[in-house]
Image: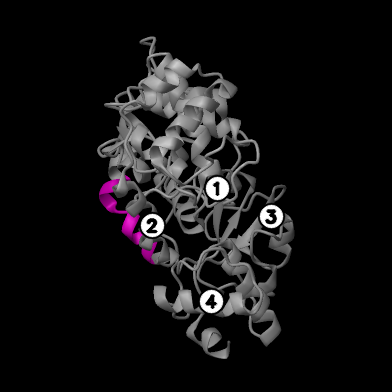
Amino acid sequence: MKPIPSLVAALALAPFAGWADTPCGGSFAAFKDALVAESPEHGVDMATAERFLAGVRQDAAVLRADSAQGVFQLPFTDFARRLISADRIERGRANARTYDNVFDRIEADYGVDRGVLLAFWAFETDYGSFQGDFNTANALVTLAHDCRRPELFRPQVFAAMKLFARGDFDPATTTGAWAGEIGMVQMLPEDILENGTDGDGDGRVTLKTSAPDALVSGGRMLAGLGWRANEPWLDEVQVPAGFDWSLSGLETQKTGADWAALGITARDGALASDLPASLLLPQGRDGPAFLAYPNFRVFFEWNQSFTYVLTAAYFANRLNGAAIFDAGNPAPGLSGPQMQQLQRKLQARGYDVGDVDGILGAKTRDAVRAEQARLGLPVDAWPTPDLLSRL
């Protein structure tokens, strides 16, 4: 359920107060014992938990993958060009034809456009061709034991135990992405429990080998996350010179009609005049520009990276026939080390930017906007060498 490489939501690090004696860290064996002791609270008997965990081992490669997220330091234009190719577009459209009846069913039942599911299918596993070769049980327990995001992964361990109890998960042989996602559209065990659907009518849910199962399950999951049936998610737009750039960003919403009154026009077609939307400038006022509608926010339930989400949403439009976006002429951005330097400077000024990771995430964007406003610069959330020098 994540990109290549996977990225799971960066959530708060504190463990839940109700956890067992070993919420994270410490002896791996003691941690597994604590999981067994806690398992009845999650509807798993201790004998099942013991069998599930018997052969589970800590995986150092998972921890290395978790810390290797350099691709997300790329600006939107570079990231999109890396993930989107003519071949990937053509194979996506071919898959749309091959599974036309499946997509018809998903659109009728859940209102999720085929372009959206094709985009996730493409980015997560290259249409199923590479689904990851990490042992999933090892990955989930390793990440639950690690103290960076235990509150995200610990519930997934118990969900995997439930899949194991019903015969749908083998701790020894089930493989997937390093962060524990399984199948063609990369779903975590809790999502499989809640949304796994037999899409091909064979009586089983096999997300690794059945495209219909994976796609219908993905559509059901998006619907459950709040997808608004048959509504758009993103429009590329043109913004007039002299615009008030402080109106950009996900925190500001106006209807499409209101944006049109401010001079914003769709690059192709028309804006959804009655829907609330936010103006997104991934590389500042001189780069690409988009209006994001409510469904765009559902993408963040699949992945927390702004760059990934915007690229997936745009790629869904491309698969449906949209033109290549206008890259504009954005001001030079910051390298990874420069972004880390900026984040440290922002931290020194009292801003919460999360991890100093060189990634222009939501917290860093908010801090950049505040500093741009303080310095009298255009407030477009795009950090430049000039802003870094001023700080």
In the image, residue 43 lies at what x, y percent? 56, 19
Q: Looking at the image, can residue 241 be seen? A: yes
Q: Nearer the viewer, mark 2 or mark 1?
A: 2
Image mark for residue 67? 2
Image mark for residue 256? 3
Q: What kind of element bears circle 1?
A: helix
Give the magenta range.
Answer: 78-89
Check disc 4: other Cα within 10 Å, few if <14, some if 14-19, many if 20+: some
Q: Please tell me which residue lies in front, 371 or 171.
A: 171
In the image, residue 265 lies at what x, y percent? 61, 62
Q: Earlier in the sequence, mark 2 or mark 1?
A: 2
Q: Nearer the viewer, mark 2 or mark 3?
A: 2
Q: Please tell me which residue lies in front, 63 or 383.
A: 63
Q: Quadrant of residue 308?
A: bottom left
Query: Are circles 2 and 3 on residues that touch, CB within 8 Å?
Result: no
Image mark for residue 300? 1
In the image, residue 364 lies at what x, y percent? 57, 68
Q: Nearer the viewer, mark 3 or mark 1?
A: 1
Query: Are circles 4 and 1 on residues that touch, CB within 8 Å?
Result: no
Q: Quadrant of the C terminus?
A: bottom right
Query: Are circles 4 and 3 on residues that touch, CB within 8 Å?
Result: no
Check disc 1: other Cα within 10 Å, few if <14, some if 14-19, many if 20+: some
Q: Residue at x 71, y 67 (%)?
A: 262
Residue type for callout 4: Arg
What residue would you read off at disc 4? 344
Query: Are circles 2 and 1 on residues that touch, CB within 8 Å?
Result: no
356 above or below 305? below
Q: Earlier in the sequence, mark 2 or mark 3?
A: 2
Question: Is 347 displayed left or right of 76 in the figure?
Answer: right
Q: Please tell me which residue lies in front, 306 or 16.
A: 16
